[in-house]
Each structure stands twice: as C-alpha cells, then as structure tokens.
Image (tube, helix red, strand yellow):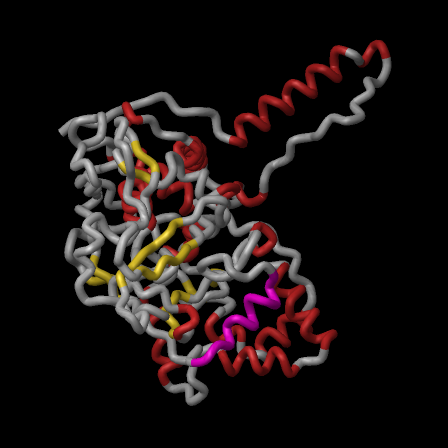
C-alpha cells in the first residue's frame, strides 16, 4: 500500500502574520523621518470564520494550523486527484469555512409522475455529477442525454465552522430531543438518521474506534448521513476529489474505467486526521446577539423546537474544551419531513426524499444563500419556504407570518446575528 507525502502551502493565518510583520518593519524604518502615509493600505485581520477555539492547547493549535493548510491545498493528478472529481480542494467548496461557492448536483431517474425509479442502473456511475476529469479523460460523470427522465437538484455544501461542537454532542441528548418531539401534537416530530458506518477503522482512535458496518447516529451532511468528522473528511476526499485513503480506499467508477495517476491508496492517514482536527477546533464565529425580545420571538414562533438553541456535549469528548458543555448549535440534528416541494428524489442512509437534517444556525453572517439548495436569497424567504404543503414547519411559518412587521424584523435580526 502506497501513500504520497507532499509539501503544504501557507495557511491564511500565516499569510496574515507575514503581512502584518511587513507593515510593522516598514513603519519602524520610517520612524525617524516622521509618520508614513498608509492611506489605501488594508490591514489584514483574523477572519473570524477561520479562527480556532480560544485557549486551544499548543499541540492542538499545531494540528489546527496543519489541518488549515491541508483544507486549502489544491490536489494534483500526481497526488491522486480524479480521475473524475468535483473540485480539487476543500476550501474551494467551503470558502471561509462557510457554504459555497462550490455546489454539488445530484440526479435521479424518475417515472412519468416524477417518482424515483427503483431501478437506477441507468446511472451506472451513481447519482452525483462529477464533471471534472484528470488523466486526459474526455468526459466525467455528467447528466446523461437521451430518453431518460431525470430529476436534477443542487446541494450547497454545509459550513464547517463549529462542527466540533456537533460531533461532541452526546448521543443521549439527540435521543432525548427525538423522544420529546415524538410526544408533540403539532406535526413536528424529527427523527434520528441511523446510519451505517461505511469507512474502515481509523488507526487514530482518540475520538472513536468505529469500524465498517456499525450503526451510528448521523450528524453531518445535509441529510445527516455521516456520523464523525474523520469519516466526513475521508468521504469528501473520495467523493468530491477522487482522493482515496485507508478509510475509503476504493476509486470512484468513471466512464473510461481508469485509475488515477497515483497507484494504490492516495493519502496517508495523518492528513485525514489533521483536517478533521482542524474542523473540530474551529470556533463558532462571534455572535452579536443582545436582543432578548428577538430570542423570545424565535421561541414564540416555535423556531427553537427544531433549531434547538443548545445541546449538551459528552463529558468524554476527546477535545476537553468541548467536553461537558452546552453547545450553542441551534439544531436538533434530527431529520424533518419538509414536504414534496423539498424532495430531491434521493435517500441518504435512512433519510427519505423530502427529509432534511435541521441546519445548525452558526455563522449566519457568512451565508450568501439559504436552504439546502440555496434557493432562498433572504432569511425571510427561507422561513416562508419552510411552509409548503406537508412540511413539519408549516405551523411555525404561520406563527411567523402572524407577527406584526416590527416583531418579524426583530426575529430576523436575531437569526441573522447567530
């Protein structure tokens, strides 16, 4: 089994430090001659969407910086990229660790009524569009032409900041919220996406020792199909870039039946774990939430039933800063049926066509668009689109609409500041 090692690029934070040092030295050189005109110079400050947890221990900070560099690294064909892929780096889909600008297109064969066919063999390379190619392939995995009836949808990549909080949440907390919602009589009743762990065991067992085939609570991905951040990383490397690892060693099928340029497994275990640790140690972007009335209106409209303000984390979580705390994630991590208008015709583990995990309300000021496919351009539009026929959130949307104009604005301002 072969692994490829390579030099890492500078992270954004390193670049900022270098530039800041340049400014200081330039100013010092001119002190004797009087103040220097710095008009037009932009000071580089830390991007709060890319900042580590406060008081992060030195060893963790070292891993954070190493994972940051890998997250931004664009992989080459000689490093195993492809032969079919979506993008060549994590950061190109999660710019500033938020959503986009990359997006994933999904496709599913449907019948005349628009219902998904049980037989999807007409899509021999899967339901994901991977249009880019390496090794000179003439075409990637694209939407087929011809007589097929297809439903094609878009998925915006989720933000990755604050994801350590989500991984740290105790299973018992998620199950508690599921049980409480099952007792409601207003149509809101989320459920766990019980997923089968599809990776091989990670040799780094600090956070878990799961192995292929185990049944776990899903947390990550738009339909909560992934349980852990190392699996999330290995899955994205394989599925989005065609980069294999010990956890996910198989190449993706492609129209030419080609292997990538690097024989064997492409990536050693440590880069997978460094990227996972980087996401674990990303802080939740700073919030400016001071309007108690806005929070009250959020609860009055029942937004907080699914966007649960806090969930308790496990005392045993291997990053002590996140262990045994109230995680302010504004999600229940449960699947909710959003009605046929949200159906993409696809299942993810046990998640159905129109079921989606409650999106965590983290770093809302970094969002360029809203909902799983980015169809909403404003928060108010996103809320109103929750109210379609058959949606569990329809009652909450009606409560929002019943508020007076000033109250709606205060609720929206509260959410925008999360």
Residue 62 to residue 106: above or below: above
Horizontal and vertical percent for residue 134?
29, 30
Q: Residue at x 51, y 83 (%)?
A: 395
- In which quadrant is the N terminus drawn? top left
Residue 20 to residue 96: above or below: above
Q: Residue at x 57, y 56 (%)?
A: 364
Q: Quadrant of residue 417?
A: bottom right
Horizontal and vertical percent for residue 203?
20, 40
Q: Residue at x 31, y 73 (%)?
A: 113
Outermost residue to the bottom: 185
Horizontal and vertical percent for residue 198?
20, 52
Outermost residue to the right: 34
Q: Report the number of numbered marks.
A: 0
Viewed as shown, does residue 305 lie left or right of 153?
right
Horizontal and vertical percent for residue 228?
31, 53
> Range of the magenta residues?
378-389
Q: Residue at x 43, y 51 (%)?
A: 157
Viewed as shown, does residue 271 lie left or right of 160?
left
Residue 388 magenta-drawn?
Answer: yes
- In which quadrant is the C terminus drawn? bottom right
Q: Quadrant of residue 220?
A: bottom left
Q: Judge by depth and name the residue closer to the eye, 20 or 97.
A: 97
* Whether residue 217 is visible: no
Residue 386 magenta-drawn?
Answer: yes
Q: Quadrant of residue 16?
A: top right
Q: Judge by depth and name the residue closer to the eye, 143 or 156.
A: 143
Q: Judge by depth and name the residue closer to the eye, 173 or 305.
A: 305
* Whether residue 123 is visible: yes
């Amino acid at each position: 089994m072969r692994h490829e090692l390579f030099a890492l690029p500078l992270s954004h934070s390193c670049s900022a430090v270098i530039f800041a040092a340049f400014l200081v030295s330039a100013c010092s050189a001119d002190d004797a001659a009087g103040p220097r005109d710095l008009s037009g110079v932009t000071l580089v400050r830390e991007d709060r969407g890319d900042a580590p947890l406060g008081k992060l221990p030195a060893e963790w900070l070292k891993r954070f910086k190493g994972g940051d560099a890998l997250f931004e690294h664009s992989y080459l064909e000689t490093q195993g990229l492809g032969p079919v892929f979506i993008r060549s780096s994590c950061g190109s889909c999660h710019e500033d660790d938020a959503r986009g600008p990359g997006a994933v297109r999904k496709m599913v064969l449907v019948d005349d009524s628009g219902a998904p066919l049980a037989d999807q063999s007409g899509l021999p390379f899967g339901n994901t569009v991977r249009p880019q190619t390496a090794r000179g392939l003439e075409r990637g995995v694209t939407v087929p032409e011809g007589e097929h009836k297809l439903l094609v949808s878009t998925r915006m990549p989720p933000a990755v900041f604050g994801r350590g909080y989500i991984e740290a949440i105790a299973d018992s907390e998620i199950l508690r919220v599921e049980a409480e919602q099952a007792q409601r009589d207003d149509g809101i009743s989320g459920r766990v996406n019980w997923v089968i762990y599809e990776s091989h065991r990670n040799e780094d067992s600090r956070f878990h020792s799961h192995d292929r085939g185990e049944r776990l609570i899903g947390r990550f991905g738009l339909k909560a199909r992934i349980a852990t951040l190392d699996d999330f990383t290995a899955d994205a490397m394989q599925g989005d870039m065609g980069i294999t690892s010990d956890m996910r060693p198989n190449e993706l099928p492609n129209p030419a039946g080609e292997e990538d340029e690097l024989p064997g497994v492409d990536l050693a275990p440590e880069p997978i774990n460094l990227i996972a640790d980087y996401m674990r140690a990303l802080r939740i972007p700073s919030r400016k939430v001071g309007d108690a009335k806005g929070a009250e209106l959020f609860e009055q409209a029942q937004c907080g039933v699914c966007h649960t303000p806090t969930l308790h984390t496990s005392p045993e979580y291997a990053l002590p800063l996140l262990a045994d705390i109230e995680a302010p994630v504004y999600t229940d991590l449960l699947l909710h049926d959003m009605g046929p208008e949200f159906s993409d015709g696809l299942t993810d583990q046990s998640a159905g066509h129109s079921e989606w995990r409650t999106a965590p309300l983290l770093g809302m000021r970094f969002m360029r668009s809203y909902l799983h496919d980015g169809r909403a351009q404003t928060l108010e539009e996103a809320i109103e689109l929750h109210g379609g026929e058959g949606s569990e959130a329809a009652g909450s949307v009606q409560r929002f609409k019943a508020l007076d104009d000033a109250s709606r604005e205060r609720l929206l301002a509260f959410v925008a500041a999360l």
